[in-house]
Amino acid sequence: MGDQYYNPEDLKKFGNIGEFQKNLADKFFSYYGEVFNDSELTAREKSLIALAVAHAVQCPYCIDAYSTDAYEKGWSEGQMMEAVHVAAAIRGGATLVHGVQMMNKVKEIKM
Amino acid sequence: MKSLNAQKNNLSDTHNQIEILENGPSGNFKLIPFKQKLIETDLFPLKPTGINIFQINVGKMCNQVCKHCHVDAGPDRKEIMTIETMQQCLEALKNNPQLQTVDLTGGAPEMNPNFKWFVEEIKKLERHIIVRCNLTIILANKKFNYLPDFFKENNIEVVSSLPFYTQSRTDSQRGDGVFNESIKALQLLNDTGYGIEGSNLILNLVYNPAGAFLPASQTALEKEYKDALLQQFNIRFNNLFTITNLPISRYLDYLIRSGNYEKYMEKLVSAYNPIAAANVMCRNTISISWDGFLYDCDFNQMLDLKVSSKGKHISQFDIPTLNERNIVVNQHCYGCTSGAGSSCGGAVT
């Protein structure tokens, strides 16, 4: 373990997770590859979704990988930032919609 | 912007470029040698499969100064092929009918004062001619406005760089205003029949990444280009060739200055594809420089890595001898073997 939790070099070692559990890693990477193939959504569209999700889950490895991938696939800077805003809006909305739960509870207990 | 040559940049010396490719800008950045990769995949020594493409670089003069140019071309480059060397090329073509395709490149090949004559002479030998036209040359000066009709009369295949279908990406690589001029030139070519179904006039576009990244899928990008160019500009074309930028000359300079060199090279190495390596263009192409020397490809030409063969000049052109040679490789060759591979005709897998 190094002196920091995240190291850009570790992204290149993602494939090594099979060292500790090969069977599940093989299944995961096979599934992962299949998910990102052109299908009913194009690989290009999937890349932009992945970029937004990477921001939502705040994974620096995924942000690194999918910023490059989305740009390589031709998305513009503006389109990529709009995708990040979609992630931010959903995350913000997810917090705020729980405000209703808070309101329900307060209304339940207050006089 | 001036060429590296005019700036007297350290990289204008090809020895310095090769030193960086082998040891990195810092002198201690080593990657697996390309030769070793070929050995591991049973491709060393890399041998020709039979030369049938005769690629002639008629000069380094160009009206543009693109940031990624591996030729270091520009208006300040005066090296152009003489009519005597062109005659030697014609002689080689005449004696070797298997050289079915003649691929003319530069610089802007049209700026060579003998370009028109040369094309007509090649046409008399009944060869397929490709001209790598940068598009803006057609509109750069009235004297070049004849080009679309001239291309049509000689049934030339036009291959043109358009790094992207948006202005910002194209201009960031090729200079301000290039995108708009390129669009106008493409519309003129379409008006002449180029890229139009049923016309038999072939117009292919070239995509290369405007930055330190690799090309996406050629098939997917072609569809994107076709949809965007048709919808926005009513432009049609035949095929899109995706070409990986090789770490040579101005692109090498860009990689180093932007701090991307090491990561880019690591990416190329990790994406090495033996199937692409087996299909590289140097196996069926010979490249001739403005001064008549022979190279395995245009990239080796720009690094001054001449063919490893007895005759190194067009005056000594001998296909059987050249077909026996070992192709000269170095670290830049990873650019042609990464992912789907790369060549002057796009992806190779």
Image (cartoon, coloured by chain):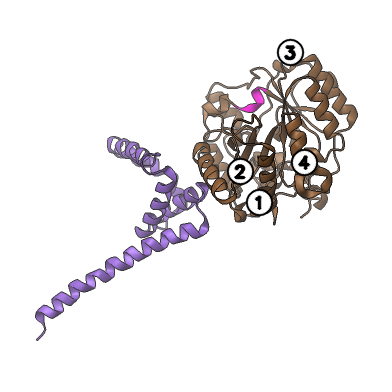
Is residue A9 left or right of B230 when viewed as pictured?
left
What is the CA distance from the residue labelled 4 to the residue labelled 3?
Answer: 31 Å
Residue B216 visible? The answer is no
Q: Chain A appears what colour?
A: purple
Give the residue number, with chain letter if any, for mark 4: B108
What is the CA distance from the residue labelled 1 to the residue labelled 4?
Answer: 16 Å
Chain of the residue displaying label 3: B
Q: Are marks 4 and 3 on the same chain?
A: yes
Residue B99 visible? The answer is yes
Residue B43 colored in magenta in the image: no
Asked whether B191 or A18 is in front, the reply is B191
Q: Amino acid at mark 4?
A: Ala
Q: Amino acid at mark 1?
A: Gln
Q: Which mark is residue B320?
A: 3
Q: Amino acid at mark 3?
A: Pro
Determine contact: label 2, label 4, CB under 8 Å.
no
Mark 1 burial class by Cα count in 10 Å: few <14, some 14-19, many 20+: many
Asked whether B97 or B27 is in front, the reply is B97
What is the CA distance from the residue labelled 2 to the residue labelled 4?
Answer: 17 Å
What is the x, y in percent for residue B134? 71, 43
Q: Secondary structure at mark 4?
A: loop
Determine contact: label 3, label 2, CB under 8 Å.
no
- Quadrant in which the C terminus of chain A appears: bottom left
Q: Quadrant of residue B31?
A: top right
Q: Are marks 3 and 2 on the same chain?
A: yes
Q: Secondary structure at mark 2?
A: loop
The first of marks 2 and 4 along the sequence is: 4
Segment tinted magenta in the rendering: B280-284
The first of marks 1 and 2 along the sequence is: 1
- Name the front one of labels 1 and 4: 4
Give the residue number, with chain letter if any, for mark 2: B208
Q: Amino acid at mark 2?
A: Asn
